Image (cartoon, grey):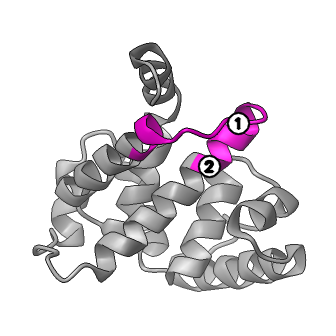
C-alpha cells in the first residue's frame, strides 16, 4: 500500500488528466468523480513499482480508460447528465471551446482516446501505441480518421498536423 505522501503527490500530478479522460468517456461530472476515486484507490492499493514518471503516467492513463469502460458496462450505472448540462456546469471548460468539446465527445472511444493522448497529453504515436497496447501504424490511422471526423464536424483545419 502506498503512503499518504505518495498518493497526495500523484493526485497533484495526475488529477486534471484523469478528470479529462473521464469526462471524455463518461460525459458526466458525477460519474467522473466516482471513477476518479476508484482510480486513486487502485493506485493506493497497487504494490508494483514504476520505472519512471512516464511509466507511472501511462499506468494512470490505462487504468483510467479501463475504469471508464468498466463503469460504462456496469449494470448498476445510473443515468448520465446530458452533454448540454455538462458543458454548462463544467466551469473549467472555456465556453469558446464548446463546439470542439462536443465534437470530441461525439467521437467513438477509439478515436477519442487517441486524439486526447496526442493533442492534450502530448504523447507521440509510438508512446500511445505502447499505452494502448496497439501497433504504431494503427495509432496513425486512428489519428488520421479522428482528425477527418473532427474536420467534418467542425468544418475547418484545426486538427491538421
Q: Which x, y percent locates residue 88?
A: 19, 54
Residue at (41% x, 74% y) in the render: 69
Span colored in magenta: 42-59
The answer to whether residue 27 is seen in the rendering is yes
Question: Relative to residue 124, is residue 3 drawn left or right?
Answer: left
| Residue 47 is inside the magenta segment | yes
Question: Relative to residue 40, is residue 28 drawn left or right?
Answer: left
Q: Name which quarter of the figure residue 28 lies in.
A: bottom left
Q: Are marks 2 and 1 in contact (CB under 8 Å)?
A: yes
Residue at (42% x, 79% y) in the render: 106
Residue at (47% x, 26% y) in the render: 2
**Circle 1 — which element?**
loop
| Residue ranking furthest to the top | 5
Residue named by callout 1: 50
Q: Which x, y percent locates residue 146?
A: 65, 79
Residue named by callout 2: 59
Q: Name which quarter of the figure residue 67 lies in.
A: bottom left
- Give the class, few, some or many, for how many residues have Cα within 10 Å of label 2's Cα (few <14, many ≥20): some
The answer to whether residue 155 is seen in the rendering is no
Amino acid at each position: 500500500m502506498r503512503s499518504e505522501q505518495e498518493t497526495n503527490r500523484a493526485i497533484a500530478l495526475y488529477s486534471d488528466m484523469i478528470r479529462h479522460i473521464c469526462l471524455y468517456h463518461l460525459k458526466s461530472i458525477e460519474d467522473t468523480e466516482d471513477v476518479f476515486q476508484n482510480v486513486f484507490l487502485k493506485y493506493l492499493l497497487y504494490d508494483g513499482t514504476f520505472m519512471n514518471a512516464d511509466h507511472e503516467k501511462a499506468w494512470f492513463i490505462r487504468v483510467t480508460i479501463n475504469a471508464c469502460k468498466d463503469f460504462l458496462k456496469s449494470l448498476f450505472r445510473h443515468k448520465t447528465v446530458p452533454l448540454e448540462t455538462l458543458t454548462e456546469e463544467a466551469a473549467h471548460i472555456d465556453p469558446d471551446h464548446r463546439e470542439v468539446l462536443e465534437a470530441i465527445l461525439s467521437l467513438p472511444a477509439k478515436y477519442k482516446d487517441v486524439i486526447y493522448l496526442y493533442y492534450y497529453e502530448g504523447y507521440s504515436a509510438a508512446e500511445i501505441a505502447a499505452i494502448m497496447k496497439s501497433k504504431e501504424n494503427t495509432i496513425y490511422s486512428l489519428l488520421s480518421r479522428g482528425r477527418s471526423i473532427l474536420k467534418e464536424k467542425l468544418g475547418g483545419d484545426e486538427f491538421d498536423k
